[in-house]
Image (spheres, rainbow, N blue to C red):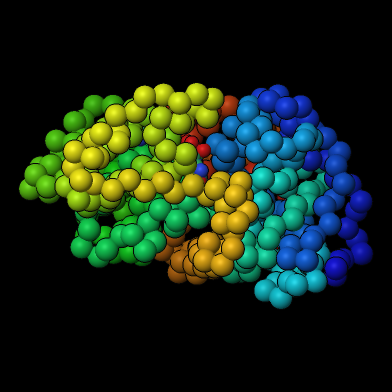
Amino acid sequence: MEQTRTTPETFVGVGYTRDRAGLPLEAVRVPVPRPAADQVLIRVAASSLNPLEYKLADLNFMGRTPPVVLGFDLAGVVAGVGRDVDRVAVGDAVAAMADLNGDGGWAATGGGYAVARQFLTVRKPPSLGFRDAAALPMCFLSAFAGLYGSVRADDTVYIPGGGGGVGHLAVQLATRVLGARTVISSGGRPESIALARRSGAHEVFDYRRDDIAAEIAKLTGGRGADLVFDTTYSERSFAETARTVRRGGRWIVLGVGPGRTTRLAETHSPVAAILAERGAEQVIVNLLRYFSEPATLDGEARDFLQRGMDLAMEWAERGLVVPHVSRTIDSTVEAISAGLRSLKAGGRVLGKIAVIVDRDLAAGR
Ligand SMILES: NC(=O)c1ccc[n+]([C@@H]2O[C@H](COP(=O)([O-])OP(=O)(O)OC[C@H]3O[C@@H](n4cnc5c(N)ncnc54)[C@H](OP(=O)(O)O)[C@@H]3O)[C@@H](O)[C@H]2O)c1
């Protein structure tokens, strides 16, 4: 392993120290990880919050032995590389996603370190700051996995929740990159409706007020959307959006799928019956699958995610993908726990919450 000499032995991470401890998180001193052959050690400048992090603190569903340091989205500087790493080198500014069944890079004091697989690590263009780069990996890859190769140029696409972390990037991808003819979105607050519009959605409805299935029927001459990508993790949304897909269309859902969103118990979901009645296909897109079933990490899946990381940087540099950071917080136990509480409560966060892990490093480019 090639590694810089100044890397410390330990750092104070932010995460959970007991199985299913929930929020607030705790500070815990942990060893700086050593990169395996295909891993990159990153000195973390910035990160961002994802709902996955409070879910892991609540449920520890990856079965890890605590302490677990959270913070999977990473932007920073390469501090060491494993022997097989040739895509990046020590000193490079990078964006990366840590393994979702491993440790992340949130640090309470004095900077943090995390390892990421080389295929999930990409050089950061100088025009993209560390903060914005750190807002992309997990949410962008989720949008990419749901839409890339699925959206056709003439499609009418419905993406509910276009003010969400994944949702706003998915809308940008569908409109600005993949060229969908009509992109419809929704939100439950004026600010999330506005973000969906700014992200390029042609029509945005209020899911608390509008009869969106009727509106989409009107817009499509009664046919329905060719493709629906539901990233809301809401059973209520699933049942509603399944009714907007056209006969023979595709309903793509992010995560574990209908009836399973609590992760604790299966609940009855009408989605399968609604889709069957329309002859529509259900596709489940779940990034966690790659980490809970390592075999699926081989070949195609690995290349697909690596391509997603490369394109995230390329499209961000070209201004096609613009992460919306609505709040920037310091990497303290209190601030991160409060941010995760807002995400968990729903309806309080717009786009992304960024975390500045190392102020000096993050100020550079
Ligand atoms: N397994 C995976 O691969 C994977 C990967 C990434 C994310 N996820 C999961 O996907 C979910 C979304 O992640 P995120 O980061 O985008 O979260 P987020 O930023 O909290 O976004 C959630 C969005 O859903 C919208 N929403 C909620 N209920 C809705 C409804 N009934 N109809 C339409 N929209 C509704 C919200 O709109 P308003 O704010 O306007 O109410 C908000 O825009 C989370 O549960 C996350 O854990 C899974």
- Give percent across and percent down for residue 128: 57, 63
Would residue 341 appear left or right of 189 to someone viewing this image?
right
Q: Is residue 297 visible?
A: yes
Let me know if residue 127 appears in the view.
Answer: no
Residue 270's quadrant in the figure?
top left
- Picture residue at 19% right of the left edge, 38% below the top: 277
Q: Is residue 273 above or below residue 35?
A: above
Q: How many marks?
A: 0
Ligand 1, by image quadrant, is top left
The residue lying at 54 percent from left, 54 percent from top is 136
The quadrant of the rendering that contains the N terminus is bottom right
Residue at 66%, 51% in the rendered image: 99
Is residue 351 shown left or right of residue 151?
right
Rendering quarter of residue 4: bottom right
Looking at the image, the residue that sits furthest to the bottom is 86
Q: Is residue 216 left or right of residue 116?
A: left
Quadrant into which the C terminus falls: bottom right
Where's residue 170, x and y in %?
A: 39, 52
x then y, percent, for residue 292:
61, 46
Q: Nearest the camera: 114 or 290? A: 290
Q: Position of residue 357 (x, y in %)?
A: 72, 47
Residue 125 against residue 264 in the figure, above or below: below
Q: Nearer the viewer, residue 257 or 293?
A: 293
Report the front residue among 118 and 12.
118
Q: Residue at image x 20%, y 51%?
A: 248
Would you say 76 lies left or right of 139 here? right
